[in-house]
Image (cartoon, rainbow, N blue to C red):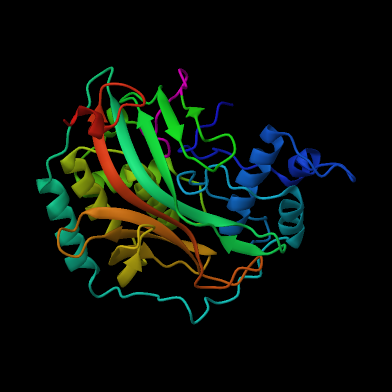
Amino acid sequence: MNRTPWRGTPEPLDHAELARLLPAPGDPDLPDDRRRLLEEQLMREIQQNPGTAAGPRVRPMRRALYAGVPLTAAALVGALLTGVLNGDDPGSAVDLGSTEKVAAAISRISTAAEQRKVPEPRPGQYIYMKSTVSHLSSSSAGGAEVMPPRKRETWRSPDGTKGHLIEPGVPGSDELSLDDPKARPNVSSPSYDYLKTLPTDPGTLLKKIYNDTKGQGNSADGQAFTTIGDLLREQIAPAKLSAALYRAAGKIPGVVVLEHAKDAAGRDGMAIARNDEREVSRTEWIFDRKSHAYLGERTVQLKDAFGVEAGTVTGNSAVLESAVVDAKHERPSDKKG
């Protein structure tokens, strides 16, 4: 399968497959393809359900924040051998937010999104996104640490079959082609052309999201919220659809408003998130308080697990620039002056 950094893996690897992929004793170095498979699985393990009698259920990984996570083979083995999380209650360091202001916040955000002018890419053009990202990684001492923010640039064709990624400092991602002629966009892996086909009635849209993600994630509500974030991440969406997605999110049980959340660029805004006791981490969508524009997102650890304390920001992003350009590697600044 040809994986791209913004697409989740549809089906998780089972533990027998992980055992096959792990290095043999005395062989600490992994080939790049095996290392990346293990990295993807580890990030899914960190976010998975604490477990049921039938075993854990895993939601597709969100690659936007974790492309090329530089975890060592030893750290991967240690984390995977830790096993399923124990499901402790969220620590006191986590702000659980408020449900009282959700309706008002969603109304302001969706109204602003609906009124915003959005460029429409034509065939042959590319959607350009420049962002700052950071993520959790293994430390030299054997623990975990949040890496310093770094720049990330993506180019994507409207149909989702062509693209490019530049992310300096990430092995294999300094210059990475995202071309995938066999791409089949869907709610978990959208393209601009796919987004244009979605209904703009919030109720109808949410029903489709529930239907298309049935059986995925730790819960239907949690997966629906995650999927809405996937539809908007590193993407330009038609204004009416963006508004509908936010309004649909407001209908999902457990959605809360956080008064303060900082993106990877250090900008302080308010956030829309969702609390779920079955989740190990929580994704927060961050918005500017005045313009209500989307700033980025962050992932916050809800429970102590894998040596990571509750309240730790394990992933963070900030959208710095978005535009429609005529070619890969072209930037909006190239047309100025």
Magenta segment includes 328: no
Quadrant housing residue 225:
bottom left
**Residue under the point 77% across and 53% down:** 74
Magenta segment includes 186: yes
**Residue under the point 30% across and 64% down:** 271
The dominant secondary structure in magenta is loop
Place of residue 320 in the rendered image (x, y in percent of width and height, measured from the top left): 30, 48
Quadrant housing residue 275:
bottom left
Q: Is 24 placed above or below 50 here?
A: above
Q: Find the magenta span and give its range.
A: 179-190
Which residue occupies the foreground of this view, 210 or 268?
268
Q: Is residue 155 visible?
A: yes
Image quarter of the N terminus: top right
Seen as rendered, the residue at the extreme bottom is 92
Residue 199 located left or right of residue 146: left
Place of residue 245 in the rendered image (x, y in percent of width and height, measured from the top left): 26, 48
Seen as rendered, the residue at the extreme left is 115
Place of residue 61 in the rendered image (x, y in percent of width and height, measured from the top left): 52, 46
Residue 242 located left or right of residue 92: left
Place of residue 267 in the rendered image (x, y in percent of width and height, measured from the top left): 30, 62
Image quarter of the C terminus: top left
Residue 2 located left or right of residue 109: right
